[in-house]
Amino acid sequence: MFKALLIGFVVFLISTFPSTWLLMLFLGNVGVGVGYWGTLPLGVLVSMLLAGASSRSYIVAR
């Protein structure tokens, strides 16, 4: 069980890294100096938004 949680946490960090890193670059250029852990919550939201926007939607007929 502990191994599965650890692997899930590592996969979570790897999957949210690109959006978090790009947000760190953007916020650094704006003048807000936050690190990875400060940007991670917003990076998670952006990752979910991108995943939802890029997924295919299906209309379920009754």
Image (cartoon, rainbow, N blue to C red):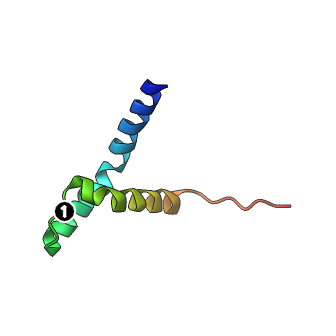
Residue for badge 1:
34
Q: Residues within 10 Å of mark 1 (few under 14, many from 20)?
A: some
Q: Looking at this rendering, what residue extends furthest in the bottom direction?
A: 30
User: Which corner quadrant of the image does residue 43 belong to?
Assistant: bottom left
Q: Is residue 46 left or right of residue 34?
A: right
**x 48%, y 56%: residue:** 51
Q: Position of residue 9 (x, y in %)?
A: 39, 38
How many labels, in total?
Answer: 1
Depth order, front residue of 42/47: 42
Q: Position of residue 22 (x, y in %)?
A: 25, 60
| Front residue of this view, candidates 19 and 33 | 33
**Residue type at mark 1?**
Val
Q: Where residue 27 sits in the image (x, y, percent)?
A: 20, 68
Going 59% across and 57% down the picture, which residue do you hit?
A: 56
* Element assignment for label 1: loop
Residue at 50 percent across and 59 percent down: it is 54
Q: Is residue 36 left or right of residue 12?
A: left
On screen, residue 57 versus residue 6, left or right, reads: right
Rendered location of residue 17, percent (x, y): 30, 49
User: At 25% from the left edge and 59% from the top edge, which residue is drawn?
Assistant: 38
Residue 19 is drawn in which quadrant?
bottom left
44 left or right of 56?
left
